[in-house]
Amino acid sequence: MRYAIFGDVHGNREALEAVLLDMEQARVDRRLCLGDIVGYGADPVDCLRRIRDLKIETVQGNHDSAAVGETPLDYFNPFAKRAIEWTAGRIGKEDAAWLKGLPLVRDCGGFTLVHSSLARPREWGYILDYEAAQRCFRLLSSRACFIGHSHVPLVFRDHDDAVTVRRAATVAIEQAARYIVNVGSVGQPRDGDPRAAYGIYDEGGGTLELRRVEYDIPAAQRKIVEAGLPEFLAVRLEAGR
């Protein structure tokens, strides 16, 4: 089974459509979403409905939660807060109910999905270092945990309680090890590469590929500015920061 795993779309329709097309061309068997469908970008409703209509299994992210009033806005920086307030005013009752109904954690059999961390997922902590990774590994009962949230692709490997980290585009998934994989962000990458990011996990072949996809950044930027959202949210897309 080949799984396409993506997240942090953040209302960026151009990036989402480019990634969905790439998944189709890569002949994946199943698509899974790590949350934060909304926030920052100018097409939150279109992105939400696209993912929902495709029946893509999804977990809830912090921006999804905040847009429906479940996470306090004082958690967010001013740019994110402004975008969430704007987004909340455009989400109808049906869309809000769907976002509210998303689980924080999803068990996919041989692996697990969570937006932030298995360690208190509602607190929206980041996994960027060994200590945070170890806290998550201690709660992981499957072979791998796929995450988003930081918008930075990273692979943590745990073998005999020794944790290492890699940034390679392709990783061999070893039977004797466990993994925490951040697949990066579709709609707002922050690793210096502005291309949309997602991962393909080949469970049978034992490989993970972190892919990058070109998309129409100027179109996404133009929509953000025209919507009256902070210009910084448009500018950062071309820098991948």
Image (tube, grey):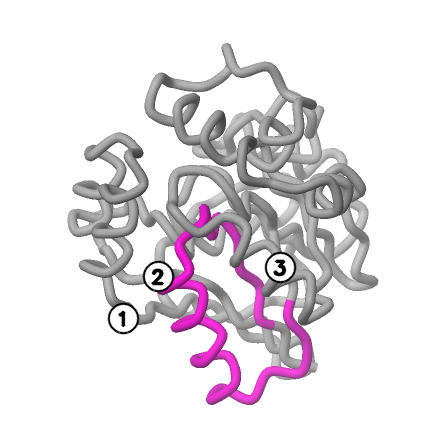
The answer to whether 124 appears left or right of 143 in the picture is left
**Hey, what amino acid is under mark 2?**
Ala
The answer to whether 79 appears left or right of 201 in the picture is left
- Residue 196 got which mark? 2
Work out whether residue 5 or residue 133 is closer to the camera in this orientation and state it: 5
Dot 2 alpha-carbon crowd within 10 angstroms: few under 14, some 14 to 19, many 20 or more: many
Q: Residue at x 38, y 47 (%)?
A: 42
- In the image, residue 112 lies at what x, y percent? 73, 52
The answer to whether 229 appears left or right of 21 in the picture is left
Which span is picked out in magenta?
A: 4-31
Work out whether residue 125 or residue 136 is closer to the camera in this orientation and state it: 125
Q: Residue at x 46, y 67 (%)?
A: 171
Q: Marks 3 and 2, Cα distance to the nearest angstrom?
A: 19 Å
For label 3, the residue is 49
- In the image, residue 78 lies at what x, y percent? 35, 17
- In the image, residue 7 lies at what x, y percent? 52, 53
